[in-house]
Amino acid sequence: MRDILPAAPLRSAEVFVLRAPVDEPVRTSFGIMRDRPAVLLRVEDEDGFWGWGEAWCNFPSCGAEHRGRLLAETVLPPALGAAWHEPGQLVRHVACKLHILRLQADEPGPMDQALACLDIALWDLAARRAGAPLHELLGDAAMSAMPAYASGINHPGVAETVNRMRKAGYRAFKVKIGFGREQDEANIRAALDTLLPGERLAVDANQAWTLEQALEILPRLREYPLLWVEEPLACDRPAEEWASLAASGSFSLAAGENMRSIATFEAAIAAAAIRVIQPDVCKWGGLTGCL
């Protein structure tokens, strides 16, 4: 990791809560998104350098407004004017200040998302201050290439979405499942029927199944050439269940966007059942924690 230049205290911060309508609702196994929300944060230090961050805010439907208020009224006040030398240090300072409030409110998820947003914004500011791309500050050894894939593809219109994303340059796609056997297999077949040579398909169940359900469902999906099956189980299920599922078939299992601590990730990796680890920098840890 490249050294970060000495930082000036933050003098200002602005929170932006946005919503964009979508023509087709985004369906998941646990809920429907009828618009696309976003919570963005702009911070500026006393020397005029600035950076942008983002917080995860998709659910519940009021999530964006809640995260925005949490940032503006709770997370940012102890960050403004405080001395800091690297993003993780300032975020830890704020988290320490808010520790008792976090326990009292019993909202670890939204608090983690707001802190992650601050961490991302500070890294962006640090990169601008250094006059270097962010990946250089993070360390190129940690930034091995991962081809981007088009996500959030679900019924209706699976084939149409895949074709539209192909025109945008994607060559790998991820389809939502977890809606029942017939709909799941229809979604998979619709995507596979449109794929060109060299293109790949993954599926995402969004924590839809119990272990018993997953053990029944996954063998029926073996006939399909899938990159991975994502979150077939809830993120709080014990490592033994993931291991049982991994031992039952030839799929690579993926998870991580709903894990919220270093210990949780370490346990998942040690169990060797989850082959594709997917931390979400906007949901927990920011760039500091996920790196």
Image (cartoon, grey):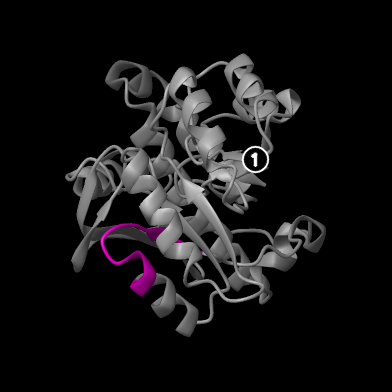
Q: Is residue 156 magenta-colored?
A: yes
Q: SS of the residue at dot 1?
A: loop
Residue 40, visible in the rendered structure: yes
- Between 245 and 122, the residue placed more toward the observer is 245
Tag 1: amino acid = Phe
Quadrant housing residue 126? bottom right
Of all residues shown, which one is farthest toward the bottom?
A: 167
* Residue 30 pos. (x, y %): 28, 37
Taking depth in this image into account, of 289 and 80 the one nearest to the observer is 289
Question: Which residue appears at 47% of the width and 18% of the height?
Answer: 212
Q: Where is residue 284 in the image (x, y as percent from the top left)?
A: 49, 40
Q: For the magenta stretch, what is the residue range?
A: 150-160
Tally of numbered tags: 1
Instruction: Name the one closer to the observer, 208 or 34.
Output: 208
Q: Where is residue 151 in the image (x, y as percent from the top left)?
A: 45, 60
- Locate residue 22 relative to residue 228 in the image: left or right: left
Any magenta on residue 207? no
| Residue shown at 61% from the left, 70% from the top | 199
Residue 111, quarter of the rendered image:
top left
Q: Residue at x 79, y 63 (%)?
A: 140
Q: Which residue is drawn at 69% across and 66% down?
A: 135
- Which residue position holds label 1? 251
Work out whether 258 lies above or below 145: above
